[in-house]
Image: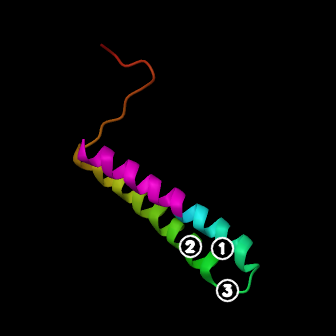
């Protein structure tokens, strides 16, 4: 359950970083590097989330299931 909460929190932080990148892109009009930093952070968080999911699956903390789980 803790892994699922961590995934949701990281996804929320990724969305915040994406929104801040959009905000800085519109506000600064290319005059600063804040957009690049925000989007770089988003990419790093996305890669980290992917690695977290791989490790959680490999250790058995999360298990895949289909749309129609077998009873």
Q: CA distance from mark 2 to mark 3?
A: 12 Å
Q: Nearer the viewer, residue 40 or 31?
A: 31
Q: How many numbered discs sit on the rendered protein?
A: 3
Q: CA distance from mark 2 to mark 1?
A: 9 Å
Question: Of discs 2 and 1, which sits in the foreground?
Answer: 1
Residue 35, picture quadrant: bottom right
Q: Is residue 2 left or right of residue 20?
A: left
Cβ atoms at labels 3 and 1 below 8 Å apart: yes
Instruction: Name the main secondary structure of what is drawn in magenta.
Output: helix
Element marked by disc 2 = helix
| Circle 1 Cα neighbour tier, 10 Å, few/some/many (<14 / 14–19 / ≥20) | some
Cβ atoms at labels 2 and 3 below 8 Å apart: no
Q: Which residue is mark 1?
A: 24
Q: Is residue 37 left or right of residue 47?
A: right
Q: Nearer the viewer, residue 65 or 35?
A: 35
Q: CA distance from mark 3 to mark 1?
A: 8 Å
Q: Nearer the viewer, residue 57 or 41?
A: 41
Seen at 65% across and 73% down, the residue is: 24
Element marked by disc 3 = loop
Q: Is residue 67 left or right of residue 21?
A: left
Considering only order in the chain, which callout, 3 or 2, is on the residue closer to the N terminus? 3
Q: Which residue is mark 3?
A: 32
Considering only order in the chain, which callout, 1 or 2, is on the residue closer to the N terminus? 1
Seen at 39% across and 48% down, the residue is: 8
């Amino acid at each position: 359950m803790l892994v699922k909460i961590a995934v949701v929190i990281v996804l929320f932080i990724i969305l915040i970083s994406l929104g801040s990148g959009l905000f800085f892109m519109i506000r600064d009009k290319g005059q600063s590097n804040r957009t690049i930093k925000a989007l770089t952070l988003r990419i790093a968080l996305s890669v980290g989330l992917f690695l977290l999911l791989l490790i959680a699956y490999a250790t058995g903390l999360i298990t895949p299931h289909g749309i129609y789980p077998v009873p």
